[in-house]
Amino acid sequence: MGPSKRERMQISRQDFTRVWKQRDMDAIRDIYSLDFRGHGFPGNRTVTRSQYRRTVELFQRVFPDCRIELEEMRADSEFVYASWVFSGTPAIPGFGPNASPVSFRGTGRHRHRGGKVVEVWVETDWLSVAKQVGRSYSRSVHETISRLPTVFRLSTLEGI
């Protein structure tokens, strides 16, 4: 007999606590199987365990203050279900310090085997996330340009 619902939920919860909150990338090896597949990641991609690690590292670099708050977790005989909220302020070099925070909701469905997560399906609106980041940087760039001396702004725009 495999892990109980409670044990599977504890394994899945480690992604939120160890990987995202504590930023322990080595925990991914403990939580996810070698043949792990994650569906529904940015670009509607399916990712491997190592690609998931790179995705997390990228998000934590782009959103250095990011947090994922687990709203609810439950399990049935086959899956662990999680709903969460991601929040963070983008910090991409060259775009200025005034980016606006980004926040989005998502859900995940985890399938377990042998005490590890073998498959995840993520549901979120990645297009909305991209639009939020774009608006955030549009405002940041506008604020940066508005602080430049008028002569510099005009001469720069004339050269375009």
Image (cartoon, helix red, strand yellow):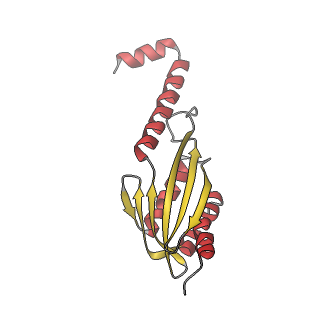
* Location of residue 20 in the rendering, given as x and y in whole percent from the top left corner: 60, 58
* Location of residue 121 in the rendering, given as x and y in whole percent from the top left corner: 44, 62
Is residue 43 visible to us here? yes
Q: Residue at x 63, y 73 (%)?
A: 6
Q: In the rendered view of the protein, which quadrant contains the N terminus? A: bottom right
Height in image: 4 above or below 121?
A: below
* Location of residue 77 in the rendering, given as x and y in whole percent from the top left corner: 52, 75
* Location of residue 148 in the rendering, given as x and y in whole percent from the top left corner: 53, 19
**Which quadrant holds residue 24?**
bottom right
- Camera-nearest residue between 97 and 109: 109
In the drawing, does residue 139 fall left or right of residue 155?
right
Q: Residue at x 56, y 19 (%)?
A: 147
Q: Residue at x 61, y 57 (%)?
A: 72
Q: Which residue is farthest bottom? A: 1
Height in image: 39 above or below 36?
A: above
Is residue 25 visible to us here? no
Q: How many marks?
A: 0
- Camera-nearest residue between 121 and 44: 121
Q: Which residue is farthest front? A: 76
Height in image: 69 above or below 3?
A: above
In the drawing, does residue 6 fall left or right of residue 93?
right
Q: In the rendered view of the protein, which quadrant contains the C terminus? A: top left
Q: Residue at x 50, y 52 (%)?
A: 106
Height in image: 155 above or below 139?
A: above
- Camera-nearest residue between 103 and 106: 106
